[in-house]
Amino acid sequence: MTPVELSRTVLHAVRRAVEDGELSVTVPERVVVTEPGAGGCGDFATNVALQLARPAGQPPLRVAEVLRSRLAGADGVRDVVVTGPGFLNISLDSAADLVTGLVREIRERGAAYGHGDALAGQVVVLRVPYEVRAEVVADAVVRIVATQGGRAVVEHGEPVDLRPVPAPEDPAPLGPDASRWALLHPAPHDRPRITADHLVQRESNPLFRVRYAHARIRSLSRNAARLGFTAEPGPLGTQPADPAVSHPASALSTPGAQGIAPHPLLTPLADHPRILLAAATHRAPDRLARHLVGVADAVLPFLPCVLPRGEEKPSAAHRARLALAEAAGTVLAGGLSLLGIDAPEHL
């Protein structure tokens, strides 16, 4: 079960509770599931019971118990635990299956992964000043709003409703990609840095990490083809720890109290649809830019474990790891495209 499917399962539980008369609320359009927070457990958590408690006129714990009883028997759900004031913590049948399902979804949807219809039929008017950062932000917002089925229109003049802090100087000398990143990566209320730091090819440069991660993934795909195998979603398997890798390959699947621990890439990849929606509704391409940095930072330590080493022969686990890496590459390429930035094949 993918995070999107789990979100639909929770929404179905809410709908059933309303239909059975246990909750008197308007069924929300969507339910957000995230990684459990402090004090939580399981694979995913949702605060939907807390959101529905006031309109339902019931305590959050009561709403949580109503939903827990319906979720506990759902396909793919192993256990549901209520924690804190009413958080639903959901354990799935297999975290390994969760990764496989997510990778399959990303491969099927490609660049459209994370796109939805939450803003379908809506026209978003962006009134911006004649200023380079405002123009670049508006251009990115137009693309991001379109991913959610909406249409954004850019206008100039007062009253302005999209006015990020202007750039202190002309970013054009940085080149098209680095200048856009310099203007889009900071939050709107932060003054962007127009410095050569955006051009250096080292780990301290977030743009370099994002583009380097994408280029490395494309290189892995080419090298795998030379070795005679392609990507195929499935169990990732385990590898002995490599002291040269900051995150050991044994973290691919680590036995724990809940069974198999989710892969570190699961959360940022599963979060991509939510980030796109938030960036669209809040007119905030900086959220997408920072999300891409998170995806890159999660995938880079994993890449040395993708291809066979030494005399190792390609196996199903190698094909699965390549599929996971390529899924991350799809998200990185799609996100950079929405920001108007090139995703290089070579770097």
Image: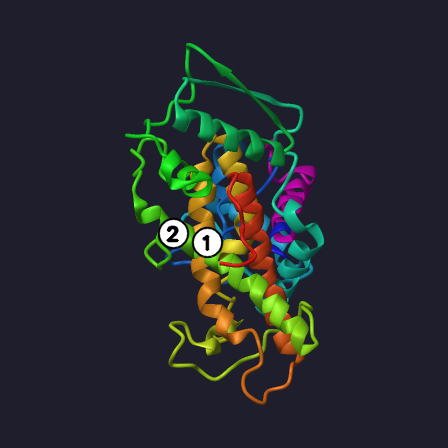
Residue 41 drawn at (x, y percent)? 46, 62
Q: On residue 210, which mark appears? A: 1
Magenta-colored stretch includes residue 28:
no
Extreme front residue here?
Answer: 173
User: Closer to the camera, 325 or 168?
Assistant: 168
Position of 172 relative to 307 (above/below): above
User: Residue tagged by mark 2?
Assistant: 206
Q: Residue at x 56, y 50 (%)?
A: 333
**Does residue 218 lie above or below 48 as drawn?**
below
What is the CA distance from the residue labelled 2 to the residue labelled 1?
Answer: 6 Å
How would you rate the neighbour count of disc 1 (Cα within 10 Å): few for under 14, some for 14-19, many for 20 or more? Answer: many
Q: Between residue 317 and residue 332, name the one nearer to us.
A: 332
Q: Amino acid at mark 2?
A: Pro
- In the rendered picture of this protein, how many numbered marks are placed on residues? 2
Residue 81 marker: none
Query: Magenta-highlighted stretch: main secondary structure?
Result: helix
CB under 8 Å between discs 2 and 1: yes
Q: Which residue occupies the extreme top position in the image?
A: 158
Q: Which contiguous range is marked in magenta?
A: 5-26
Question: What residue is rendered at 35% in x and 59% in y?
Answer: 203
Residue at 58% x, 62% y: name it.
218
